[in-house]
Each structure stands twice: as structure tokens, then as C-alpha cells.
Amino acid sequence: MSALLSIENMSHYFGGLKAVSNFNFEVPEGVIYGLIGPNGSGKTTTFNLITGIYRPTEGKILFDGREITGYRPYRIVHRGVARTFQNLRIFGNLSVLDNIRIARHFNFKAGLFGSLLRTPGALKEEKKIREESMQLLEVMHLQNRALEDAKNLPYGELRRLEIARALATKPRLLLLDEPAAGMNPKEVSDLMDLIRRIRDEFNVTVFLIEHHMKVVMGICERIKVLDFGETIAEGLPEAVGKNPKVLEAYLGKRGA
């Protein structure tokens, strides 16, 4: 499999603190890839670097063979990379449907004037956006919530809404930052099924950060482990789960 995302010798500093150190990484197209590590190990910083929130101090990032290092976030979305956040970023006072429609308008072709003048082309595109948005809500089992204010949804449904909104930009690479955080066991199992379905039905590569080991070991085909900004293990889930460095990072040294 060819690499959809490649990171070469990437490091990032916050003042004198090295948050990510000499990070090298490839995410093959079509896989579900996991990035794990203790709190403060540099996982979310890595996502922020990939999606343009931060610019790497050193190294470069390539997506589909083209360098995107230092691109603004909107340009990276245009290239085909979307993400969710550890802390939900939903438009609570808008309807569930409008949260999706806003994301779909990212690729709106009729333009501002077409929208304001309600041209036939703009109206046709608006109809298509609404239909596609409703289809996404059906995938997430949120179609019956379409007209409700997003702030009224329970936590698990808000998580699914944020994933749907990311998918609305039609990405090739979907980054999920702790999608199972705060979910109950039933919601976690449903989420695992959903992520597999997203990969298969939307033909999207999934790269996720997750602390919930049931999720990581249950759906990830490869895993990379960070500790203090450095890679300590990488490979198949079975091998990573038995790696002494990984066990030490999570459980502490024996006898400590």
C-alpha cells in the first residue's frame, strides 16, 4: 500500500520544551491507524501539526506525495484532510442538519453572489447539499435529530455529529482525536462498528488518537506509540501490546 500521509524528521518546540522529536511516520492509504501514548506524549500536538494549527519547527509533512508543511488549516482541508477534536467544537445553537450543511458548503461552487441571488445553479446545489447532509445523518443514526438544536443532543450523539461534519468535507484522510472519550461501553462498541463502516463505505483512511484500549486493539491495523514526544514502538497491535517499553510507559517501571 502506498503512503497517503508521510512525516519526515518532524520536531516541534514550545519554548525550550520539545513536544515532538524527530518524528517519522507513514500512514498507508485505506488503513485504520492508531497513535497512542500517555498524557502529554505529543499525540494531539502531532495532529495539530498535520492539520496546520502549528507549523513544525523542523521536518516536513507530505499528503499524497505533495508537501503541505505550513499550509493554513483551510488549505489542508481542501487537500483532503479532515479532523475531529478532543474537546467538541459543535455549533450548539444551530440545528444538527445545519452543522453538516455548513461543512458541505466548504466546497460550494455557486459562490457568494449565486447564493445571495438564489440563481438556479445555487438552488440546485443547495438541494444537493441538503440531500447529502441528510444521508450523512442517516449513516450516523441522527436523521431523526436533524432539526433539533445540536446543544440538546446527548454526548455520544454529539461525538457522531462531529464525525459526520468532518466527513461532510469529503476527506481522503480522517483524523479522530479521542473519539471514544466519555462514552459508555455500548457507545464504544457502536463507535468501533461506525469507524469500520466509515473506512469501507466512504473509502477514507482513518488515523486516530485514543486512550481506550478496546478501541485501539479492536479496530486499528497498525499502531504507533509516543512517549515524551518520541516514538517508542510501532507495528501490529499484538506486538505493540506486548512491547516492554509500551508497558513501562503506561504502567511504570516494575517495582516502582
Image (tube, rainbow, N blue to C red):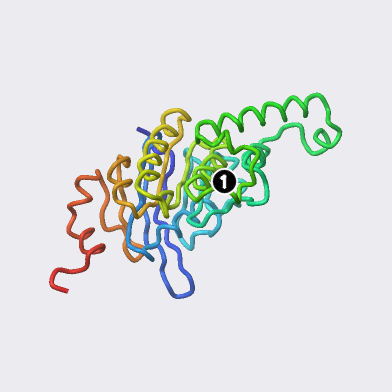
Image coordinates of residue 33 in percent, x first then y, are 36, 43
Please identify the quarter of the rendering in which residue 1 is found. Answer: top left
Image coordinates of residue 224 in percent, x first then y, are 31, 51
Residue for badge 1? 76
Left or right for 197, reference 126: left
Up-down: is 212 above or below 174? below
Total residue callouts:
1
Closer to us: 231 or 209: 209
Q: Residue at x 41, y 29 (%)?
A: 200
Q: Residue at x 77, y 27 (%)?
A: 123
Left or right for 212, reference 85: left
Left or right for 115, reference 245: right
Please identify the quarter of the rendering in which residue 117 is found. Answer: top right
- Crowd band around label 1 with a 10 angstrom C-alpha radius: few (<14), some (14–19), many (20+): some
Closer to us: 81 or 166: 166
Closer to us: 179 or 206: 179
Quadrant, the C terminus: bottom left
Q: Residue at x 58, y 43 (%)?
A: 77
Q: Residue at x 68, y 38 (%)?
A: 105
Image coordinates of residue 217 in percent, x first then y, are 27, 45
Furthest toward the right, the residue is 117
Left or right for 77, reference 39: right
Up-down: is 178 above or below 197? below
> In terms of secondary structure, where does tag 1 sit?
helix
Please identify the quarter of the rendering in which residue 122 is found. Answer: top right
Furthest toward the left, the residue is 255
Closer to us: 59 or 249: 249
Q: Which amino acid does the dot numbered 1 rest on?
A: Ile
